[in-house]
Image (tube, rainbow, N blue to C red):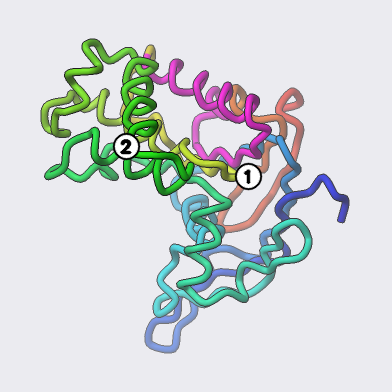
Amino acid sequence: MTDNIILEVKNLVVSTVNENKKNTILDNVSFTLEKGERLGVIGDSGTGKSVLMLSLTGLLPKNNFEVTGEILYKGKTDLLKFDRKNMRKFTSEKINMILQDSMNILNPYRKISDQITETLIFKEKISKKEAYKKAVKILKDLNISAAEKRIKDYPYQFSGGMKQRIGIALSLLGKADILIADEPTTSLDAINQEKILDKINRHIKENNISLIYISHDMRVISKMSDRIIVMEKGKIIKEKLAVDL
């Protein structure tokens, strides 16, 4: 393994076992991710893309899934050897995630200001005053007018598109090495989709972050990837540079 490889997945197999019947969802999946690289994962629904993301982040319920193989961080740390608690702690520091329907990460009963500032304090270890100031700037960067006033609002007072953009912005906070994005813009209109994709690209370039972008949309994958792996029925069937696909 070269020093530039930040993540290596080796022979990853994920299965469910129900009534002594095994169903394989991911079948010997192997790939590498280099520092600062953008890796696209494309395939139809049901090909195992989202299960792959959950495997990388320790979010698969261990009671329901059997997982074998290796997920190596910087060639040394095998994430699959962590227990669930330590896996979640490790990935919360090293891996950021943008999920489908990111607006759902917002707590409807808490002000936007509290949710952003607490995330900033936890992930960036800054003071409450600094966090509040940065939270206002985040809303301004998202083109939300009257940010100083709106930051004191609750999620229900924002449109669906605004909540989605705030949720994505929250997912980009911190100093993680890897960002995994799972169909993050599917519920956005074309204009806001392009803005968010540009924001993600700008964020990973400025911070030298590695990206795994999961989608079934070839146009989006081409924009967000340097290299692309194609999945079908839980297997990687093709791997190409984005310019060659």
Q: Position of residue 40 (x, y in %)?
A: 62, 37
Q: Secondary structure at mark 2?
A: helix
Q: What kind of residue is marked 1? A: Asp
Q: What kind of residue is marked 2? A: Ile
Secondary structure mostly seen in magenta is: helix
Q: Position of residue 41 (x, y in %)?
A: 59, 42
Q: How many numbered marks, from 0 up?
A: 2
Q: Residue at x 56, y 38 (%)?
A: 213
Distance (Cα) linking label 1 and label 2? 20 Å
Q: Which mark is residue 48?
A: none
* Drawn side of residue 221 relative to residue 132, left or right: right
Q: Is residue 59 above or below residue 230?
A: below
Q: Nearer the viewer, mark 1 or mark 2?
A: 2
Q: Residue at x 44, y 63 (%)?
A: 59
Q: Is residue 226 above or below residue 77?
A: above
Stretch of the chain drawn in magenta: 192-221
Q: Are marks 1 and 2 in contact (CB under 8 Å)?
A: no
Residue on which the image places disc 1: 177
Residue on which the image places disc 2: 116
Q: Is residue 198 above or below residue 170?
A: above
Q: Residue at x 46, y 37 (%)?
A: 173
Q: Residue at x 37, y 43 (%)?
A: 119
Q: Position of residue 124 (x, y in %)?
A: 48, 42
